[in-house]
Amino acid sequence: MNQETSYKLVDLYVDNALPEELCREMEEAAGRDPALAAEIESLDEAKAVLKAAHPRPDFTEESFQRILMLLVARGADVRPRSEAPVHLQYQLPILG
């Protein structure tokens, strides 16, 4: 992996969104390039700070029901859609 590609993949690496093979290549590239290692560490620290500042909200069944009722009150159609037929064929009229 070349240096330019490594720098483009830093954000995906920090988010653990890369396949295992690319993760290994990123780790090797970071071992050879101190600036890349510093970039990874800096982005990882920024991610940790943001995560600490804005914790994930608790989404409970009560929250779901409250949002659902607000949608219904505003006129949203929240009925479940019918499932597509398994066979995915058009229904032909029966002639006879």
Image (cartoon, rainbow, N blue to C red):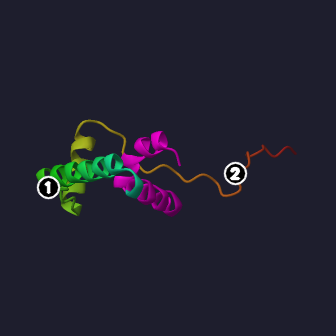
Residue most toward the top? 74
Q: From what the image shows, is residue 62 above or below residue 73?
A: below
Residue picked out by circle 2 = 88
The answer to whether 51 appears left or right of 39 in the picture is: left
For this rendering, which residue is in front, 84 or 25? 25
Q: Nearer the viewer, mark 1 or mark 2?
A: 1
Magenta span of residues:
1-30
Is 44 in the magenta?
no
Measure the C-alpha gap from mark 1 to mark 2: 47 Å
Q: Is residue 85 above or below residue 73?
A: below
State left or right for residue 15 relative to residue 42.
right
> Label 1: which residue?
52
Residue 54 is situated, as x and y percent measured from the top left of the image, at 15, 50
Q: Nearer the viewer, residue 8 or 90?
A: 8
Helix, strand or loop for disc 1 = helix
What is the crowding at mark 2: few (fewer than 14 residues within 10 Å), some, or many (at least 20)?
Answer: few
Q: Is residue 21 magenta?
A: yes
> Which label number is shown at residue 43?
none
Left of 4 or right of it: where is 85?
Answer: right
Of residues 57 and 53, the one nearer the viewer is 53
Q: Residue at x 20, y 48 (%)?
A: 46
